[in-house]
Image: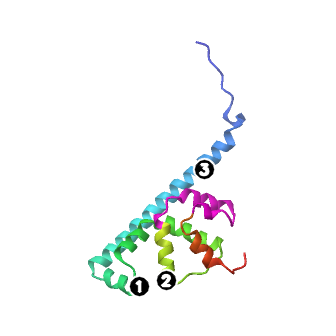
Amino acid sequence: MPSIEQPPLESMPYRPRLRDRLTEFGWRIRESLTDWRENWALRRELAALDRGWLLGETLADIGVSRAELASIAAGHPKRSRLFGRMMARLRIARPRRAELLDLLTTCNGCTATRRCRHWLDSGSRTGYEAFCPNAETLKRLGAGRPH
């Protein structure tokens, strides 16, 4: 069988794109592992508070239910990071506690995290309305603020 000589990889036109994609993939894996470790540490800390009978009192003090805490903790830190970027992009100051809790709970239940991340990476200030379940509240909170 005759041997087919392959050109060197460096001369192939797709090489830079492949390298970029592999680099991005590596960073995403690293970020996912870091997120997993942070989420695990948060869950350990919450479990320790619960064993010490402090979690219930703390939640009552801040007006958060266990179900709401579970939802927020499940999305930590990825959803928190996306939410923070969204608030910064739209130049929205920290809302009142009840509104913040509603926003975070909705964000943590959202299924459009990939679209959200791509939108945030794009640098745009418009278009989030198409996928963000918090869009109406965010618009209301950002009304009157200079962009």
Label 2 Cα crowd, 10 Å radius (few <14 / some 14-19 / many 20+): few
Question: Magenta segment range?
Answer: 108-131
The residue lying at 61 percent from left, 13 percent from top is 2
Per the image, label 1 sits on a secondary structure element best described as: helix
* Precedes in sequence: disc 1 or disc 3: 3
Q: Which residue is mark 2?
A: 97
Label 1 Cα crowd, 10 Å radius (few <14 / some 14-19 / many 20+): few
Label 3 Cα crowd, 10 Å radius (few <14 / some 14-19 / many 20+): few
Q: Quadrant of residue 88?
A: bottom right
Q: Position of residue 105 (x, y in %)?
A: 46, 71
Q: Which residue is mark 3?
A: 23
Q: Do the numbered discs 2 and 3 sit on residues whose CB atoms are within 8 Å? A: no
Q: Is 112 one of the magenta-colored residues?
A: yes
Q: Do the numbered discs 1 and 3 sit on residues whose CB atoms are within 8 Å? A: no
Frontmost of labels 2 and 3 is 2
66 lies above or below 19 = below
51 lies above or below 129 = below
